[in-house]
Amino acid sequence: MAGNSAQAGVSVASRVLALLGAFDPEHRALTLSDMARRAGLPVPTAHRLVAELVDWGALVRRSSGEYVIGRRLWDLGLLSPTQSGLRQVASPFLHDIYGATLATVHLAVRDDLDVLYLDRLSGHASVPVVSQIGSRLPMHATGVGKVLLAYAPEKIQTAVLSNLTRITPYTITQPGILRDQIRRVHRDGYATTVEEMSLGACSVAVPIRVPNGQVVAALGIVVPSLKRDRARLVAALQVAAQGVGRSLGD
């Protein structure tokens, strides 16, 4: 982290950013001392700045004493032209899919080596779903992730394929198998998972393309099984994805 943050001459803004930068996917909840250490700040300085961040809503203090990112930062992130525009345009199509399937529906984009979930509608079926709006999950173990990985630059694919962590007994950890699945995404137009992210949950996802052909996001559904309804779910997703893509191009 920003190890030089405590040096004289560093602005207050830099110290605040160092504190916020102490959080990452592996450190979602931190004590004050951990934040100070990771930001390279004296504890008294961190204490003062963290109190202001809590008052503003950028951080939330749990009953355990740990701090987590507050909703206000997420709300600000949604003002980003790319994410807010995509989420707003896609929203009615997500609700259409949900109304037709009553399944959990996801809208996601790639964030470096992970999937970032921009929106989620929770389904009626009792299916274990670990994603949350604003959360990040591995690309190789999620339907939307496999779609986004298939259209990612080669260097991103190489980085992901070199670190295929096992999450469940069914997670694909063999690079060759995942390469084959990526090729099938291009051939078939969709990706699937079978209990690869969480047991009892399967998913199917399709790309969202803007008019120039660029894949900008993925749309997915999580269901208990894909044995019977795969074709119907793929068709519903593809119609919705085409609608989102056309709307983004207007």
Image (tube, grey):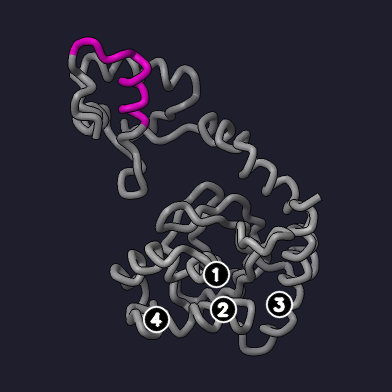
The circle on residue 147 is 1
Q: Position of residue 80 (x, y in %)?
A: 60, 36
For disc 4, the marked residue is 170
Alpha carbons under labels 4 and 2: distance apart:
19 Å
What main secondary structure does the magenta stretch of the protein show?
A: helix
Residue farthest along the front direction in this orientation: 212
Q: Residues within 10 Å of mark 1 (few under 14, many from 20)?
A: many
Q: Residues within 10 Å of mark 4 (few under 14, many from 20)?
A: some
Element marked by disc 3:
helix
Earlier sequence position, callout 3 versus callout 1:
1
- Quadrant hosting residue 208: bottom right
For disc 3, the marked residue is 233
The reply to whether the C-beta atoms of the residues labelled 1 and 2 are less than 8 Å apart is yes
Earlier sequence position, callout 4 versus callout 2:
4
Image height of 182 relative to 104, above or below: below
Foreground: disc 4 or disc 1: 1
Q: Position of residue 146 (x, y in %)?
A: 50, 71
- Is residue 116 shown in magenta? no
Element marked by disc 4:
loop
For disc 2, the marked residue is 185
Foreground: disc 3 or disc 2: 2
Q: Position of residue 135 (x, y in %)?
A: 48, 50
Earlier sequence position, callout 4 versus callout 1:
1
Q: What residue is at 75 percent from the left and 49 percent from the top?
A: 89
Give, as a single range, the part of the protein colored magenta: 8-20
The three-letter code of the residue at mark 4 reads Tyr
Alpha carbons under labels 4 and 1: distance apart:
18 Å
Q: What residue is at 26 percent from the left and 15 percent from the top?
A: 10
